[in-house]
Amino acid sequence: MRFFIYLSYKGTSYFGWQIQPNNPSVQESIEKALTLYTGNSVNITGAGRTDTGVHALNYVAHFDSDFPFVGKDSPKHIYKLNAILPPDIVIDDIKLVNNIAHARFDAVSRTYKYYIHFNKDPFCNDFSYQFHYETNIKKMNNACEYLLGIHDFTSMAKLHSDVKTNICNVSKAEWEYIDTNKICFTITADRFLRNMVRAIVGSLLEVGRGKSEPEWIEQILIAKDRGKAGTSVPAKALFLCKIEYPEKCFEI
């Protein structure tokens, strides 16, 4: 049987989602918990990588197991798995899916949020980036218009990544006020490249503080040169918050 596992994690102590030698990862922690609980080796496949220090809400991965995770005892199984896991990782749900459903390749969209605060706030430090400049959110939203649609995001990606294409289709990109001290950037696309959101946010903030005009974002994309974009912002304020799948994945 194949399952989708929905989880949330604080990425501060992890070198991203994916297993890597000599460094803690979220994937490794989940696999160890599932293997210990079921008594059989369990390998999981995530919806995609998250970088070191990035957080996730409702992250999705799939795994195969004969263990009866769904049914009337499902809450008990989730409770016991969470007891095994470290406190910064939590399993929210486990769902039975069809045997060919794939957490990475079947995902139709992913949504990230990035949080910024302006005035010093000790309760924001772990999950928000303090930006020390006045920011024109209207200009940043004008700049977001250049991100929408299908574009080559080479200028916003980590160099020498092992991907076949840097083409992404962005369906949403916008800033909004949370309160007088906080703003949030939300972006949705069919896929994301490594470091892409953090590079986009860093570039948009340069527009917001008046160093560049909104049209600069279009010029960055056309250049296909990482050196033309803004500096990447810190990972601690970035959350993967939603992954969507077609109904076919849940047709058993």
Image: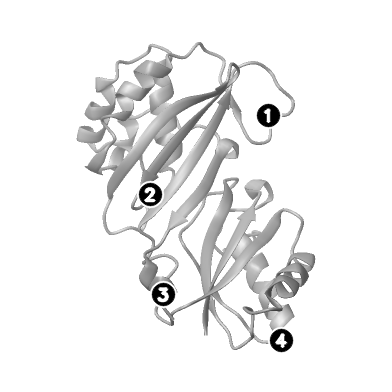
Q: Where is residue 92 in the image (x, y as percent from the top left)?
A: 64, 61
Question: What distance separates the C-alpha of mark 1 from that of mark 2?
Answer: 26 Å
Q: Mark 3 points at which residue?
A: 101
Nearer the viewer's eye, disc 4 or disc 3? 3
Nearer the viewer's eye, disc 2 or disc 3? 3
Q: Left or right of 111: which side holds 191?
A: left
Mark before the other along the chain sequence, 4 or 3? 4
Mark before the other along the chain sequence, 2 or 3? 3
Is residue 176 positioned above or below 150 on the image? above
Question: What distance separates the C-alpha of mark 2 from that of mark 3?
Answer: 22 Å
Choose top left, top right, bottom left or bottom right for residue 100: bottom left
Look at the image and tell me whether residue 21 can be seen.
Answer: no
Q: Left or right of 83: which side holds 136?
A: left
Along the line of sight, the residue nearer the viewer: 158 or 138: 138
Identify the element where label 2 is drawn.
Answer: loop
Q: Name the residue under label 4.
A: 39
Given the image, on which type of amino acid does mark 3 rest?
Answer: Ala
* Disc number placed over residue 193 in the picture, else none: 2
Q: Position of residue 225 (x, y in %)?
A: 27, 36
- Asked if the residues shown at circle 2 and circle 3 are in contact, with their CB atoms under 8 angstroms apart, the answer is no
Question: What distance separates the C-alpha of mark 4 from that of mark 2?
Answer: 36 Å
* Disc number placed over residue 124 in the picture, else none: 1
